[in-house]
């Protein structure tokens, strides 16, 4: 039995993961800005679930949530940074306050949680950190530059963190989902208030009012939850876990295009060295 702390447990992947973790017999600190939204889970598993209020942008709440989990279950062994949201805007359209709030939730919130759980994990010389990213960090669709930037930042941090923590017995897994039938592209999705006409054929096509994909995505969040548990419990957890056939196809396309461009510009690249 392990103790998991899962952010953003009220809906979508976070809720399915919390339910799967509890059904598997683990303890779970289930968090949401409104703890009432996860009360049903806590009531269904009174001995192994703890519902806690957590806005990841409030670092006092971060510390309190981790402390509550440690006091109830004697330690946090798996942290899942799942809380986050999407924001669509051409880069020029992005509102400074909106972008700052996005980074506060998608990047600095996870960093605060990582820092809060690591003292306990280091003391035990064991643990796992799971950071939920997105295939958007690789594909970088028009209109998702700021969202892709937050996930790219989280992935870059995770790569270094993995190397720092591996000698201490702590694993770090980045999860890149493709399209899943959650509320991510529905109510939770935000966008720039004032579109610019010149971006109508690029970023504009992905505005909420033009997006017909919501509710038809191929990914099943319940199956994604099982995949995450399997990755955490593996003898050698992966550095990167892709979720969904669409994500796997997309990342292969990105890698192929990058390799082709590297080859095309290889002579220019090596030509910048001092002569041998």
Image (cartoon, rainbow, N blue to C red):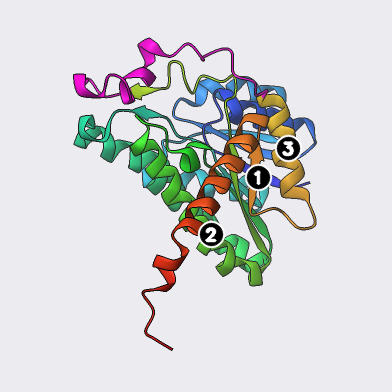
Q: Secondary structure at mark 2?
A: helix
SS at badge 1: strand
Pointer 1 local density, CA inside 10 Å: few below 14, some 14–19, many at least 20 = some
Residue 70, compared with residue 52, is above or below; it is below
Residue farthest to the bottom?
Answer: 276
- Position in image of residue 235 (x %, y %): 80, 57
Depth order, front residue of 125/61:
125
94 sits to left or right of 253: left
Give percent across and percent down for residue 5: 60, 42
- For the image, the number of numbered tags is 3
Whole-number angstrom distance, CA of label 1 to CA of label 2 = 13 Å
Residue at x 71%, y 22% (from the top left corner): 44
| Residue 51, image quadrant | top right
Quick one: 163 or 201, which is closer to the camera? 201
Spot occupied by residue 71 in the image (x, y as percentages of width and height): 60, 49
- Where the C terminus falls, by quadrant? bottom left
Give the labeled residue for mark 3.
227
Q: Which residue is mark 1?
A: 241
Q: Is residue 37 left or right of residue 61?
A: right
């Amino acid at each position: 039995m392990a103790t998991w702390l899962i952010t953003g447990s009220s809906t979508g992947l976070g809720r399915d993961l919390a339910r799967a973790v509890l059904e598997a017999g683990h303890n779970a600190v289930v968090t949401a800005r409104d703890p009432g939204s996860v009360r049903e889970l806590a009531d269904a598993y009174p001995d192994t679930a703890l519902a806690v209020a957590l806005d990841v942008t409030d670092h006092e709440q971060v510390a309190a949530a981790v402390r509550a989990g440690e006091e109830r279950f004697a330690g946090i062994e798996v942290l899942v940074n799942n809380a986050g949201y999407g924001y669509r805007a051409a880069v020029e359209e992005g509102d400074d306050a909106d972008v700052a709030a996005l980074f506060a939730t998608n990047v600095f919130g996870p960093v605060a949680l990582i820092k809060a759980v690591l003292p306990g994990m280091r003391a035990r010389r064991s643990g796992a950190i799971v950071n939920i990213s997105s295939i958007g960090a690789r594909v970088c669709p028009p209109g998702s530059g700021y969202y892709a930037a937050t996930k790219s930042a989280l992935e870059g941090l995770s790569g270094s963190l993995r190397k720092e923590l591996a000698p201490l017995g702590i694993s770090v897994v980045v999860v890149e989902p493709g399209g899943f039938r959650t509320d991510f592209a529905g109510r939770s999705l935000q966008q720039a208030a004032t579109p610019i006409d010149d971006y109508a054929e690029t970023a504009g096509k992905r505005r909420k009012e033009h997006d017909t994909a919501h509710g038809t995505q191929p990914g099943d969040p319940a199956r994604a939850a099982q995949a995450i548990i399997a990755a955490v419990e593996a003898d050698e957890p992966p550095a990167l876990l892709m979720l969904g056939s669409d994500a796997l196809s997309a990342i292969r396309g990105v890698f192929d295009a990058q390799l082709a461009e590297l080859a095309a510009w290889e002579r220019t690249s090596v030509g910048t060295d001092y002569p041998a």
